[in-house]
Image: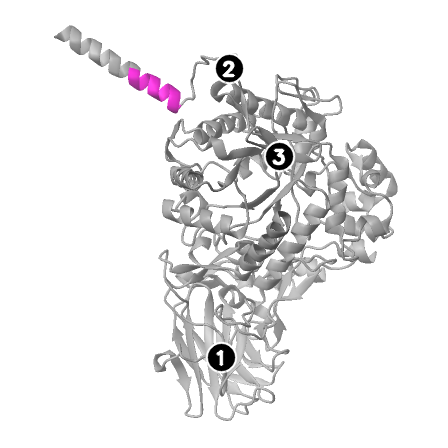
Amino acid sequence: MKLFIAVASAVVLIFFAAYYAYFHLGVYIDLQPDGEVDVRMTADGDTIYMERDGTAEPFEIRGVNMGVGIPGEWATDYAIEYETYLRWFGLIQEMGANTIRVYTILHDDFYNAFYDYNTDREEQGLEPLWLIHGVWVNDYIQNSHRDAYDDDFLQTFLDDCHTMIDVVHGKKNLSLGRGLGSGSYRRDVSPWIIAYILGVEWEDVTVAYTNESNPGRSQYAGSYMYTTEDATPFEAMLARVGDSVIAYETHRYKQQRLIAFSNWPTTDPFLYPAEITNFFMKCAQVDVEHIKTTDAFLSGHFASYHVYSYYPDYLNYVLNPVELEVSDPAWNDEEIELSMSDAAGVPIESVLTGDEAADYRDRDGRTNTYVAYLRALNRYHTIPVVISEYGVSTGRGMAQRDINTGRNQGHMSEQEQGQALIDCYEDIMDAGCAGSCVFTWQDEWFKRTWNTMHAVDLDNTPYWSDYQTNEQYFGLLTFDPGKTESVCYVDGDLSEWTEEDVVWSDGSSSLSVKYDEKFLYFYAEAEGFDPDQDIFYIPIDTTPKTGSTYCQNYDLSFERPCDFVIRISGTDQSRVVVQRRYEVLRAMYMHETEEQDAYLDVPDRDTPEFQYIDLMLQTATPLLTGNWEANAEVYETGKLRYGNANPQSGDFDSLADFMFAEHGVEIRIPWQLLNFSNPSEMMIHDDYYEHYGIENLQIDEMYVGLSCGESEYRIPMAAVELEGWGKTVTYHERLKESYTMLKQYWAQIDAGRQG
């Protein structure tokens, strides 16, 4: 009996050891070392092919990137449910896309849903949805002291690649860990995987540091990938990773598929004129033409780029050159010539025709440096080019402008987003690319942007919808506050407003207030109000630290010290202004905007001076004007836009801030515009000059008032109680108008091809 128990125990232990080794550690035995390798996707020249019924047919990657964020959750919470994925897959394919791209390993609900969705499609004789899978490289590793050959970088990259392959083949267990998907992966989704895009947008400093630190590692020769003699150490690292991916999947699963390495203009293979190189500090190139494949790799590779029309738009400055005239010795001609001669890369002029009409004009004859850049990429590469990210944001805030085409990073309506996506897609295809992926499927509340991240509590971004942060609104699917509908729509329909919303009234005029996870809403009314002649003033007091009882700009007096004034003056001259002491741009960016130190000449706590509310833009103004003393560019984000903000209305404008109603006006103000850093806990900016920057202050009430026209008396103020919602958010999905526009456009293209 004891022998039986011992043997049984040994068998159980062996089973669990083998199970752990196979599903956790990736240990396997290649029982068919000479077995036939299955290849569905191939690439040749500028074309990607898919095998269908034994024939290789050209295949256009028409994709959508998909993140993992939903309101109230961080991306690393992996909170999207199986049913949600199923619904989203259907909507994406109905739109006309044939591919989704994910950046990293997700939780098992994604793969289970993807498997079931495609299995059901194929059982009905319908085209499945294809998948491009990525492997992420940690941002903190890239922006650290490590180079790409450090174990924390390279070995982790290799391990994650092998893990990803096991996951898509349904042979992996992962333990729960923040930043890493988890679950028992048993669904084999590999039949629908068409490609792997390895890595992320490489930091140029990481690339340069790797190349400088590893001069003897510029060559790699593997079974499937090798480098040319012109390769850099960073490119050799990529070849090693790609070779490892192909080898692992070939030997363990007898499959091969397309491979690409992520890239973007910051590390593109081109050399630009000295002014551009130095201004943008473009210090490194990643050139996949230095990575070749052997005959053993039966599939193929392509060049993957994230290209947005507004960033960094190097060709705009090539098209409009200015003379370099600065006094900084670091910019002298000798230093520039040295940096140019030492840099690796291909002169951009070598892939431009020199004919501006041919290079820089699009199909409609417009100046278009976006299409010019895409053409340059396609002329240079001997392998297919896929633009794996392109898009624009519908956020109210803006960070960058596209000077040529107006496809800006932010402050675009949903209709403008739709047209911009169509235009970008046409540019991509006209340039000869093999495919593209829209960025992105869904809006993500947790995201941050460089020109607003100083103003918000970065530990609580998923718990409110920050309309000033453009990075949150690249999606085709948005999330509006409220379980089924928002608490208010600014459309002139007053049915949402009740007596309970009134916070101040004098019998002839009144002010009502309400709020949700995205906006503060106001309804101001007055007897006989004429929007063509009358002006509403709404003073707002949020912080107890500062504020003025007088606004010299509009000659108004208030019952309490106020921080902001909303001025509704017709459809074109309405805005929010802020007391200068509470102006965040001055406190954080005065050196860039006025070349002064904000903390040397501090505005008085009760200064009566109120300012326009501006946001920084990332531009290269000196390269366009030749004025190297020019200050940073800003734009007025406090200006209010008139229109109908109800998505159900035929004249819907997603950027509308206010609309007139009978005897009054409805207004919605995004929280950050009033210096709320985290409205879910009612946190606002404290006094900047007490803390030498932004610290948070919690409030439980604010005060508001109303005047119809100028008042010879102090405008009375009333309290509005503020109670945050913590981490419990409400939201409902809504497809943007851009989704419908793209769906109709792609349907027309497909109908034309079939015809």
Kindly indicate whether the residue at mark 3 contacts the one at mark 2 (C-beta within 8 angstroms).
Answer: no
Secondary element at tag 2: loop
Kindly indicate whether the residue at mark 1 contacts the one at mark 3 (C-beta within 8 angstroms).
Answer: no
- Residue under the point 63% across and 28% down: 300
Q: Which residue is mark 1?
A: 492
Secondary element at tag 1: loop
Q: Is residue 634 above or below residue 375?
A: below
Q: Residues within 10 Å of mark 1 (few under 14, many from 20)?
A: many
Give whichever of discs 2 and 3 has the lower sequence position: 2
Q: Is residue 480 above or below residue 153?
A: below
Residue furthest top in the image: 3
Q: Which residues are magenta?
A: 15-24
For the stretch drawn in magenta, the main secondary structure is helix
- Residue under the point 69% across and 42% down: 265
Query: x%, y% of residue 590?
Result: 66, 61
Disc 3 from disc 1: Cα separation: 54 Å
Q: Which residue is mark 3?
A: 57
Instruction: Say what amino acid the circle numbered 3 marks.
Output: Glu
Give whichever of discs 3 and 1 has the lower sequence position: 3
Quadrant containing the N terminus in the rendered view: top left
Instruction: Say what amino acid the circle numbered 2 marks.
Output: Gly
Instruction: Say what amino acid the circle numbered 1 marks.
Output: Gly
Q: Quadrant of residue 45?
A: top right
Query: x%, y% of residue 196?
Result: 56, 33
Residue furthest left in the image: 1
Give whichever of discs 2 and 1 has the lower sequence position: 2
